[in-house]
């Protein structure tokens, strides 16, 4: 039994995915100090009421710098190259304030949807210079009370073919870039692009997170080169590839081989359902392929995967609310996930992206930061299916948001108003 006054705060009756029955969570100095069925202490209490507590969602791939652009461009774009061209044209005019304002909007939505960790890609090239990077750095600082934001700097327009990008990338890595990205499919020399990205990763001792491919033609790809570079440089467990839509176009035998290759090289895959579904398969006039790589199946075969947001309300994805619970639901539905896969689908927006980002302080465990969100459900198995409300969130034991439950007003015999909370 822990002595009284040992805690600053106790969460009572929290259902954890790892516990059969609700537990109490004691918090001291912003960290979890104890997890037990019944803690005796007189600290401030928050009653979770047997509801599900998670350590927050982890968005391992989002673009805050080019979010919320729908009002500025045509809405009839439908291909990857058109989307890249449209943003390239607009970003020359981006100011630090502009990027900050649009990014803050998305960040605040993500926070109230329960995201506690996020990796944002930030475009670095001569068109935008370091303005986007500066804005996102300011967002990281200003929202540190609610979310851990990590910056992945990357050359969206290519590297070897875009003079000036390399120097800017180096500057960003010196000045707070925490991960390096790459985009070989926009470079005239994809292998040289990858080699330079890996050189910089080693020089600055940062992880690699690539935009790998974005089409459904499996006759060529850069995946072999990524795995080769990863193994040659001993970077297993430090490399992720985003989209990887070609994997969705492989027949079973080739997919099996690619899966084994990814698992062996320790290369993770991030699936971005909203964008992949929007941009892929548009040339088909019927029975359109959806271009969605089946992350939960890759996970079953030893590949680390995540499902993430990518873009919000821009030419790449004219949808989005930065809710990862909704995204996991969307993914599971389109990916033909069965009920037995639902747990993995929840992992894809929590534990697995935390591992992909090599976060060491994530999870509801003694010694870790008291970061948690509360979902209005008493059964974790169906959280992604039923989309429960996310009622509140805490970071380091401090409440960062709460959501009030909707109320029904059924008529009553007496004519007296009554309010009823709908069943969760
Ligand atoms: Zn992306």
Image (tube, grey):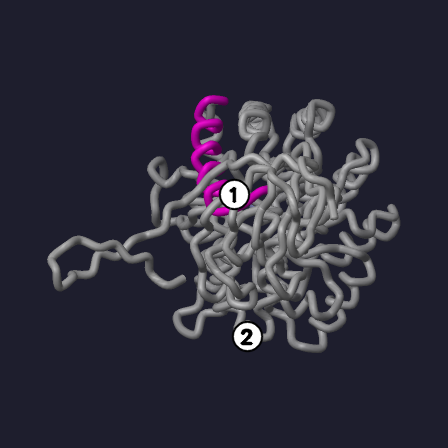
In this rendered view, identify the residue nearer to me: 44 or 113: 44
Tag shown at residue 115: none
Residue 99 appears in view: yes
Mark 1 is surrounded, within 10 Å at the Cα level, by few (under 14), some (14 to 19) or many (20 or more) other residues, namely many
| Nearer-the-camera pick, 219 or 295 | 295
Q: Is residue 97 magenta?
A: yes
170 in magenta: no
Up-down relation of residue 229 to residue 370 (above or below): below
Q: Quadrant of the C terminus?
A: bottom left
Q: Position of residue 77 (x, y in %)?
A: 39, 49
Give the labeled residue for mark 1. Answer: 393
The dot on residue 339 is: 2
State left or right for residue 106 relative to residue 33: left
Residue at 65%, 75% (x, y): give it: 251
User: Of the residues under marks 2 and 1, which one precedes in the sequence?
Assistant: 2
Mark 2, Cα crowd under 10 Å, few <14 / some 14-19 / many 20+, is: few
Q: Is residue 208 visible?
A: no
Label 1 element class:
strand
Q: Kindly report the secondary structure that dominates the magenta region of the rendered protein.
A: helix
**Magenta stretch bounds:** 96-116
Identified at 34% across, 43% down, the residue is: 74
Q: Residue at x 70, y 34 (%)?
A: 178
| Figure disc tally | 2
Q: Residue 290 at what x, y percent from top left?
A: 49, 66
Q: Is 195 or 260 nearer to us in this picture?
A: 260
């Amino acid at each position: 039994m822990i002595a009284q006054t040992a805690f600053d705060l106790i969460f009572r009756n929290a259902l954890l995915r790892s516990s059969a029955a609700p537990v109490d969570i004691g918090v001291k100095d912003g960290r979890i100090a104890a997890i037990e069925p019944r803690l005796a202490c007189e600290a401030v209490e928050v009653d979770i009421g047997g509801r599900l507590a998670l350590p927050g969602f982890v968005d391992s791939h989002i673009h805050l710098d080019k979010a919320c652009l729908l009002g500025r461009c045509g809405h009839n774009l439908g291909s990857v190259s058109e989307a890249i061209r449209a943003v390239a044209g607009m970003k020359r005019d981006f100011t630090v304030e502009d990027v900050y304002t649009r990014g803050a909007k998305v960040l605040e939505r993500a926070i109230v949807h329960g995201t506690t960790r996020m990796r944002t890609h930030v475009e670095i090239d001569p068109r935008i210079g370091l303005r986007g990077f500066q804005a996102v750095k300011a967002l990281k600082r200003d929202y540190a009370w609610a979310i851990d934001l990590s910056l992945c700097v990357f050359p969206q327009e290519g590297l070897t073919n875009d003079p000036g990008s390399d120097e800017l990338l180096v500057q960003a890595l010196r000045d707070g870039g925490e991960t390096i990205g790459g985009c070989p499919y926009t470079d005239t020399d994809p292998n040289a692009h990858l080699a330079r990205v890996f050189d910089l990763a080693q020089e600055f001792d940062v992880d690699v997170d690539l935009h790998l491919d974005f089409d459904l033609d499996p006759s060529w790809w850069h995946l072999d080169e990524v795995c080769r570079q990863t193994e040659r440089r001993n970077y297993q467990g430090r490399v992720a590839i985003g989209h990887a839509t070609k994997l969705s176009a492989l027949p079973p035998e080739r997919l099996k081989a690619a899966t084994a290759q990814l698992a062996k090289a320790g290369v993770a895959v991030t699936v971005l359902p909203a964008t992949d579904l929007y941009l892929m398969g548009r040339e088909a006039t019927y029975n359109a392929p959806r271009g969605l790589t089946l992350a939960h199946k890759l996970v079953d075969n030893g590949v680390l995967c995540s499902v993430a947001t990518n873009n919000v309300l821009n030419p790449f994805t004219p949808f989005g609310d930065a809710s990862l619970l909704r995204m996991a639901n969307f993914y599971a539905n389109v990916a033909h996930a069965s009920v037995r896969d639902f747990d993995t689908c929840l992992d894809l927006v929590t534990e697995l992206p935390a591992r992909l980002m090599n976060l060491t302080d994530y999870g509801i465990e003694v010694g870790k930061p008291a970061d948690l969100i509360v979902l209005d459900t008493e059964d974790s198995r169906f959280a992604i299916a039923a989309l429960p409300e996310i009622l509140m969130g805490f970071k380091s034991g401090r409440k960062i948001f709460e959501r009030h439950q909707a109320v029904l007003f059924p008529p009553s015999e007496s004519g007296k108003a009554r309010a009823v909370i709908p069943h969760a």
